[in-house]
Image: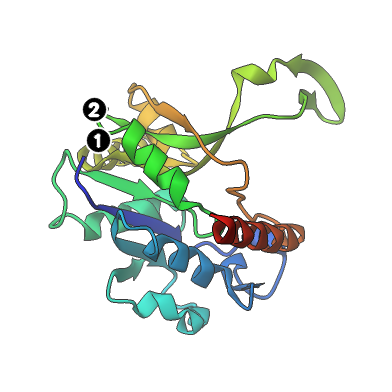
Amino acid sequence: MQSKVWVVVPAAGSGSRFAADRAKQFYPLNGLTMAEVTLQRLLAIPAVAGIVVAKNPEDTHWNEVQALYHAKVLSVAGGRERADSVQAGLHALSEKLGADDWVMVHDIARPCLHSDDVEKLLATLSDDPVGGLLVAPVTETLKQIVGEDVVKTHDRQMFALAQTPQLFRYGVLCSALEAATSSGAVVTDEASAIELAGLSVRTVCGRADNLKVTVAEQLPIAEAILAAQKQEKLKT
């Protein structure tokens, strides 16, 4: 595996589930914005060569994100769907990466990413022809419901929670996303596109504290995780 990898960060969404006056990545977190915290985390990882942020160019809140102007950060216009934004980021890397090079995709709303997870992902997948993603185990009983009624209880050991970063060969990911888009398929993460292409996706168990902030109530949880990780680092 190459010693450095580029990261694509799809960040053009509105975060509608926050039901607020701005996209969720611009909400305060540890005295900064969530976008700032996430990008700073990525920039601090030695294996990261650079970051492409696919953003809404009309959203002026990006002016508040200082990390966007870092020398290792590029910004491009994102799209309406996540896959559109990822494809825009991948296109920006077309002259920097070859088909067999690795590229990571990470959610702007995962500000608690730990460098250990990235190192583990890179090491585990180093010889894989396709790539894979970080996952977390399902720790609670999993119910399938229709309406308000339970129709089945599933064996949680058969399931995992998809996280990011997701790491794939550049050419494989570009082709898979293009095929998914052409077919009209809706993919909610990069692994979904790879699966639709009929390829095998590896999983790497990550830390449970790699939280994705989806609703406003999770912001205090993210702050608590960041504080705990800081203490953990001080003890090592």
The percent coordinates of residue 164 (x first, y second) are 48, 45
Which residue ends up furthest to the right in the rendered image? 149
Question: Is 63 placed left or right of 128 in the picture?
Answer: right
Labelled pair 1, 2 in contact (Cβ < 8 Å): yes
* In front: label 1 or label 2: 2
55, 121: nearer the viewer: 121
- Is 33 displayed left or right of 123 in the figure? right
Q: Identify the residue at horizontal 44%, vertical 81% (top origin).
A: 66
What numbered label is drawn on residue 172? 1
Q: Residue at x 33, y 70 (%)?
A: 75
Tag 2, which secondary structure? Answer: loop
- Where the N terminus falls, by quadrant? top left
Residue 129 circle label: 2
Q: Position of residue 67 (x, y in %)?
A: 41, 75
Residue 183 position by quadrant = top left
Depth check, front residue: 55 or 8: 8
Secondary element type, mark 1: helix
Q: Is residue 29 visible?
A: yes
Mark 2 nearby-residue class (10 Å; few <14, some 14–19, many ≥20): some
Q: In the image, what residue occupies the spot 63% across and 78% down?
A: 31
Compare marks 1 and 2 and give the one earlier in the sequence: 2
